[in-house]
Structure formats: C-alpha cells, structure tokens
Image (cartoon, rainbow, N blue to C red):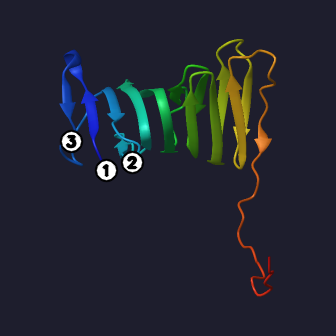
Amino acid sequence: NGPVRWIGDEGKVRPVQSTRDSLRGGTVSTLSDAATVTLRFSDGSEITLAGDSEVTFSEENGQKHVYLNRGDLSASIERQPTGRPFIIHTTTAKLEVLGTRFEVRSEPDATVLSVSEGAVRVTRRVDGTRVDVPANHQVRASLSRNEKLQAIKRREPLRSWSSDLSERTQS
C-alpha cells in the first residue's frame, strides 16, 4: 500500500509494481507515513514495514539477514534450520530469531523489541550484552552501557472500560 521503492542488484532503483514481484535481495523503502509493504521469504516467513521505514535484506545458504535501517517492522518468522537463525540487525542491536512473532522499532539511539510469540535473543552492539526475550515481554537496547538490558513483561492491553456520562455539571 502506498509508494514503495526497491534498490536491487547493481544499485538500480525500481518501483515495486506488483504484489508478486520476486526480489532476490536489496533495499526496500516505504516512501510515506501511510505506506506499508510485506516481504515474504521462500520459507513463508514475513516481515512488514510500516510508515517511513527501510530494510536491506539477503538470503544465502538458508541464512536470512535483514538490516532495519530505520522505522518499524513487524514479523512472523517460521522455524529456521538449526544453526541458521533469521537475523535482524539495527544500529544498536542484533536480533536472532528461530520462529516467532514480534514487532521492532529502530531509532538512531535505540531498538525497541516487543515479542508476541516464541522468543528472540537480543545482543546490544555497544557492549555485547545479551538477553532472551520471551513471549509477552519487551526490551529496549540503547547505545548506553549504563542502561540495563532487561526483558520486562508487557502491560496487558486494555480490553474494556466504562464511563458514566449521565451526570452533567454546570459552569
């Protein structure tokens, strides 16, 4: 949905014309705040970019690498072969995924990961600190060595609320 650009082999810029375009690798960018694009890998794993986002991706010998250069990404990753995790790189962290569902936001000074199913191993680039993030948890990996790298339980979503609008006040 919306304008999407692919920079593929030899640095050639091409607009994505169809939902069936086959991309071997390269850089995909969404070009507006309202744009989204979903990339489906050969094993059925999917990543979706939303808003002003950009990824560079490749797959070689069954090893998938995605570089989230900026923006927001949500993913549904199929179980990966032993020893070949699906890897997402950001400016501040490396995420190793075997099979799970999660969302990640890459900012210049931090990466925020929220896991819905499965688990993701996060390695902070600045000092190599690692943490495994299980389902229903999140973590923030920043450039600061002083900030603790810790998985914390996500708040439960608000499922219902009530309000009494019958009482009126006069001014």
Image location of residue 28, percent across then percent down: 33, 32
Mark 3 or mark 1, earlier in chain: 1
Q: Is residue 46 left or right of residue 129?
A: left
Judging by the rendered image, the residue that carries numbered circle 3 is: 21
Q: Residues within 10 Å of mark 2 (few under 14, many from 20)?
A: few
Image location of residue 156, percent across then percent down: 75, 58
**Real-space Cα distance between discs 3 and 2?**
21 Å
Judging by the rendered image, the residue that carries numbered circle 1 is: 1
Q: Residues within 10 Å of mark 1 (few under 14, many from 20)?
A: few
Judging by the rendered image, the residue that carries numbered circle 2 is: 34
Q: Are marks 1 and 2 in contact (CB under 8 Å)?
A: yes
Q: Amino acid at mark 1?
A: Asn
**Residue at image location 64% in from the left, 44% down from the top:** 115
Q: Is residue 47 left or right of residue 112?
A: left
Q: Amino acid at mark 2?
A: Ala
**Residue at image location 30% in from the left, 27% down from the top:** 25
Report the mark closest to the observer, 1 or 2: 2
SS under mark 3:
loop
Residue 162 position by quadrant: bottom right
Q: Quadrant for the C terminus, please.
A: bottom right
**Residue at image location 63% in from the left, 37% down from the top:** 113
